[in-house]
Image: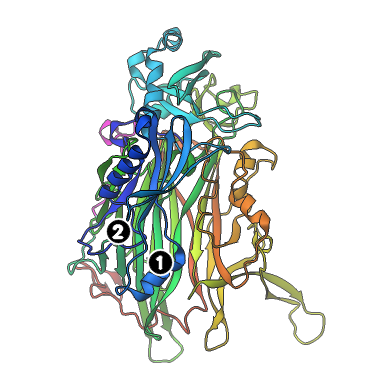
Amino acid sequence: MAHSLKIPFFLFSTLSIIPLSHQLEQHPLDSLTAKEFIRVQAIVNQSHPTSTTNLTFQYIGLNEPDKQAVLSWLKNHPTTTPPPRQAFVVARINHQTHELIIDLSRDDIVSDRIHHGFGYPSLTFQEQIDADQLVSNHAPFLAALNKRGLKAEKVVCGSFTVGWFGETKQNGRVVKIMCYYLDGTVNLYMRPIEAITVTVDLEAMKIIHFQDRLVVPVPKAAGTDYRESKQKPPFGPELKGITVVQPDGPSFTIDGSRVRWANWDFHLSFDARVGPIVSLASIYDTEKQEFRRVMYRGFVSELFVPYMDLTEEWYYRTFFDAGEYGYGLCAVPLEPLRDCPANAVYMGAFVAAQNGMPIEMPNVFCIFERNAGDVMWRHTETMIPPDLITEVRPDMSLVVRMVSTVGNYDYINDWEFKQIGSIKVTVGLTGLLEVRGSKYTHKDQIDEEVYGTLLAENTLGTYHDHFITYHLDLDVDGEPNSFVKSKLQTVKVTDQTSPRKSYWKVVSETAKTESDAKIKLGPDSAEVLVVNPNKRTNMGNFVGYRLIPGSVASPLMTDDDYPQIRAAFTEYNVWVTPYNKSEKWAGGVYTDQSRGDDTLATWTSRNRRIENKDIVLWYTLGFHHVPYQEDFPLMPTISTGFELRPANFFEYNPVLKVKGPNNVRGPNCSVSSSGLN
């Protein structure tokens, strides 16, 4: 599900990092500051003085400097000045979409282009709120509530993007309104008011279509409230508390937006569309005595969430959470000791309202060191009697976390940096299902396709997908890289050289063009690597990093289905493109009602050369979500992700010489031959 609940707290549209410490000079990749938002707003308003009543800011973010300019500044810092600060703005001005680049060093407009193609910019919270409120005074809607015996004051509504289903003409900026019933619960998503369609023109801000197709029972409120204070016995067993203590303080430092921990050094920023952006991630090589870059820039590029229900009020629910709603815009303040452990440090943000003015929001990110009791490496040697040799190193890592609540779903986003050189990226899905009201109260009554699972009386959990596409600009020990895909191939032994009948070997292929690099991951064993063909280890292997996927899912919709045309970038799990600053959002710049003509899939149709080039790896992970009763009334978290892991990047195990922390033994535990005392 991909629309936003309207709460006054969320009247925002862009975020930027609030530094924890004073920073003398801005980093070129820093998010825009509150003062910069104010300047952007003033510059745009002054350039369109007669349009102030018809001017809204749909997106404001950093216009990323040219990569080479950033790397040059980084190499020569602090003797050189940083690249000029620029903002990228998408605004609706007099009912047209303007794409502007603002030079903040000169306070002027570099370019102001009107978008004439398909698709519209992302929605703001304010226009969604305004659209939702229209129904409260709409007589046909009030009559529909009265017919169902519902109280108008207990109804809340949300805005849904409408997608594209083959229309030749553009529909204009419209949304459909879906409403829910409270009255005994705050879990509104478990009480949908079905079969009512309200269509709103966002530009005119008026209802242009209303339909009340049939009456469907509203699911009951009983048993749906998830608040701790509302739970009643019987309860499960209580656990004793676990405290995270770092008596010497954290091992990481934050200087503005630069984070340093153990052997890692990276830049962290925030974007309204994609959320956290990790840049310039480099790892210190103790043997070479230098930092070596791993990734120039990494972030969530798009989330595609199509529902499989074909009924009239559901078929269009095929959401692009980043491009239509703003994955970063939907970030929520993290709850200390609940979302993050006691040793976490928080970073806040500034947000800009629809009119461009900044508002402060706290606790967008938390950063903490994790010691979950895992083992980084160990060995016990028993073959040298009478000695028993045991060496163990606990696994410690640094986590950057953000939670984005996009309507009913809460996405827990972690970027985890490990001492072994890995970057582990995880996304956890929790929150509330998008359910459809139904006449059925027992599975045995169902005699038709209902597109979901009966979870409770009158409550169908609809089948749906989540596809999350990551933009990973890997610079493995430098910008020129190549993409290598390796398969494990079974070889039969046909002669008498061994009693064995078979073995397997690695067969590798270096992709020369974009079409060579497209991969659908599946049951066949495969190794996916990005290597630097210009640098080798002492053993002669190309230095590299490999992608280790988590759960793999591919679209099950047909290629000619309109939502899949728009989301063709999910067709493959892995894509590789040559670096292009403008190619960062896999679904295109204008995703609302897009037609699939500006996506990662169309960019790669040029089949550009990628061997020994500055390349970008795109990875799509996914879930096919079949709801079960355990997902009702609120889902336990289910997680997946991937790992970027060194592959001949180091000469040997980079954590061989890592020492364990001082407090390896808890204060109240001792180990004896008979066990724990």
Whether residue 43 is visible here, answered yes or no, is: yes
The location of residue 244, given as percent across then percent down, is 24, 60
Amino acid marked by disc 2: Ile
The location of residue 625, given as percent across then percent down, is 54, 42
Q: Which one is in front, 106 or 315?
A: 106
Relative to 75, does residue 160 appear above or below in the rendering? above
The location of residue 639, given as percent across then percent down, is 46, 51
Q: Residues within 10 Å of mark 2 (few under 14, many from 20)?
A: many
Determine which of the numbered discs, if any, sits on residue 70 in the image: 1
Relative to 401, does residue 159 appear above or below in the rendering? above
Q: Does residue 560 appear left or right of residue 256 in this picture?
A: right
What sort of colour scheme is used for the picture? rainbow
Secondary structure at numbered mark 2: strand
Relative to 511, does residue 365 appear above or below in the rendering? above
Amino acid marked by disc 1: Val
Q: Residues within 10 Å of mark 1 (few under 14, many from 20)?
A: some
Q: Main secondary structure of the magenta part?
A: loop
Circle 1 or circle 2, nearest the eye: 1
Determine which of the numbered discs, if any, sits on residue 485 in the image: none
Secondary structure at numbered mark 1: helix
Please state the extent of the stretch shown in magenta in the rendering: 225-241
What residue do we see at 40% from left, 60% from top?
278
The location of residue 298, given as percent across then percent down, is 45, 59
